[in-house]
Amino acid sequence: MLYREAGQFKASYAADQAIFPITQDRVAVIAVLLIAYLGVPFIQGDYWFEAILLPLLIFALAAIGLNILTGYCGQISLGTGGFLAVGAYSTYKLMTAFPDLNILLIFILAGLITAGVGILFGLPSLRIKGFYLAVATLAAQFFLVWLFNKVPWFYNYHPSGNIEAPPREAFGFLITGAEATPQVRYVVILIFVTLLTLAAKNLVRGRIGRSWMAIRDMDIAAEIIGIRPLQTKLLAFAISSFYIGVAGAMMFSMWLGSVETEAFQLFVSFDVLFMIIIGGLGSLLGSFLGAGFILLLPIVLTNLFVGGLGFTANFAKHVEFMLFGGLIIFFLIVEPHGLARLWQITKEKLRLWPFPH
Amino acid sequence: MSVRKLTLGLVSAAVLTAPILATKAQAADEIFIPLLVYRSGAYAPNGIPIANGFRDYFDLLNKRDGGVGGAKIVWEECEFAYNTKVGVECYERLKAKKPVIVNPYSTGLTYKLIPKAPVDKVPILSMGYGRTAAADGRVFPWVFNFPTTYWSQASAFVKYVGAQEGGMGKLKGKKIALVYHNSAYGKEPIPTLQALEKKHGFKLTLLAVDHPGQEQKATWLQIRRLRPDWIFMWGWGVMNQVAIKEAAAIGYPMDHFIGVWWSGTETDVVPAGAGAKGYKAGTFHGAGPGYKAHEDILKLVYGGDVGKAQDNKWGEVLYNRGMMNAVYSIEAIRTAQKKFGVKVPTGEQVRWGLENLDLTAARLKEIGLDGFTKPVKVSCRDHETAGPVMIQQWDGHQWEFVSDWISPMTDVVRPMLEEAAASYAKENNITPRSCN
């Protein structure tokens, strides 16, 4: 009833090519953005920011990065943890080597460095495909983490190998370090995530995105119609790594503040991969939904069990493991194409509601 | 469809109730202490006894004395499986309940919380772990790591080995291997050992074991080839028992194998069976349930049921350590209560209490821990107190003390530590406070 596109006519090319062609969608997205920018920063208390919003946005960005590579270009990668680490450690090196450099610029530079590393590890993708490529990217994961653990230059010869984000300002606001308020950090991350999501949306629906999808769907056919696999695949690796690198930079400097390589172990790569599988491969919305599912469900379950039902902490944890696994399987059976597809089906049903026939 | 609706309903109900539950306020006469525990995952074998030690001591005080200074002790456990990211969520959730002190029990989490402590006004007591440089109270007013630190312990180990070899001069040319957890925690002793290597002329070999440490075949193959005279181990969780089993399997003389104080509890040695006999570890307090406080816990917490108490690791080394950490926290709170004349001190007041903590032998006797550990006196400048270390040895059934209290080499450790603190201060634009 409310969600109906009848009467909305596209009178120009611009209207026809809009990201959200349906007015209701557009209104909803603008409303969400308005709340995110103007409402949320006024929430008091650190819990919502530190435990929920910051990790949600950061991991959503990493998931978008992996989705570009895996969801759109069809190259499976298990190196996400390693690329996050590249983003984090290059941020640290840049922050300490050039204290006067604007921190926002450092994030971009860290992303570019990660993109370079991504291209390097993307080279094997020209020869190997599918699961074999996953194994090759696994090498990136292990090599990079090993490197940051082994070479003391990366952590400035600190005795414990830990890297810590020193306080830095941008435009008069303290945005890294312990004294930076979570609200400010949230807004900075939100700006990055909004801009990068918009960029990703325009990439994937343009020429580049179409060539990625052509490679994904059948690389020989794509080659025959004139798409060059070398450039296309490496571009996907580069852009994907750029997103993941920026996510790693923000994860280190604006969320955790202090990390060691333990934070970038293999299970992080799996987490991000699960985010896009559950959220929806080849969907930007899916990246957000998947990140929300993987990050928030355990927190919700813990709060429910410990706070609501009074279980002991460890019993709740074990129940949570089982329930979490069960829910993943449940959602994959109900909708193997991910939460984004579920949302799409809901929208289609809503169009007819309340008179389906 | 109905199942789906039900699930969605449950999830949304949970989402809505979560924040309400998270901000439940404390009653007037209650002191809240958050307990960040890990009873699951690769580090559970060590996490469980510590968590039980804390819980039982608080429970005892509530039952026997009605809490501390007339205020009841309230605690809540949050399971984080030694994962720093989950630990952050735990800390933020429990922070809403106005904690007066936090014991993170994870090096990664301690590092993460150190810069936050002055902002949140919650003092950190990282008892014998965490950032060693925090011992410099001028740079780290909110962090305490008494009674002693990794660097002090490493120097005490070298001293012990020197004594065993018949004098520090005999260390020259000896081979010492360090088997360490490849993380911030495991890397802590390396600079100290390297400095001592230069000074005393022994040969140090570093052997890293990656998280979680279940696979160590390569490491122990290297040890077989190297044949070191002594092995030091900085291990945690599952890594400990695997290492001890591997050492026994290659027939390494166990009495030349010394673990850090986090690698010397019953759960670490029991799985290796008779092979673990002779294994040594550092410690800074008594082992076993032979103290009056243990008796009280048995009586009041477990109703005299020895079997149930033992199931809960009562009297094991790490249980005792959790209990000792609880004692320190409580005594600091008591100090703060006395000074400020309040029942429920704030985090700032407890910070003062920690800094002015003077736990004398007489006081230890009063709380039923006569001779359990050395007295501790913290000061503004010295948050470590460079307490002495003892070596304990596993005889197949229980831990025995095989050394006197060994004082660390303060002359080597303290300057390194102050240098590390100064470089932290510089990197983070902190002006060290004056302690005169």
Image: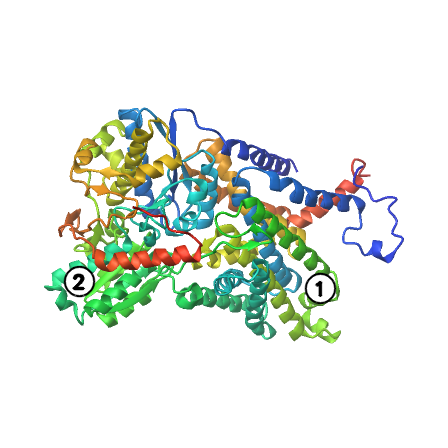
Q: Is the residue B142 above or below the residue A71 in the image?
A: above
Chain to which mark 2 belongs = B
The Cα atoms of the two marked residues, 1 and 2, are separated by 63 Å
- Taking the spot 43% from the left edge, 66% from the top edge, the residue there is A146
Q: Is the residue A318 above or below the residue B136 in the image?
A: above
Give the camera-side residue of B165 and B126: B126
Q: Which mark is residue B253?
A: 2
Quadrant hosting residue B153: bottom left
> Is A206 on the left-hand or right-hand side of B37?
right
x%, y% of residue B355?
30, 41
Q: Which residue is mark 1?
A: A209
**Disc 1 packing (10 Å; few <14; some 14–19; many ≥20):** many
x%, y% of residue B13?
58, 33
**Disc 2 packing (10 Å; few <14; some 14–19; many ≥20):** some
- Taking the spot 21% from the left edge, 67% from the top edge, the residue there is B199
Q: How many marks?
A: 2
- Taking the spot 31% from the left edge, 56% from the top edge, the residue there is B418
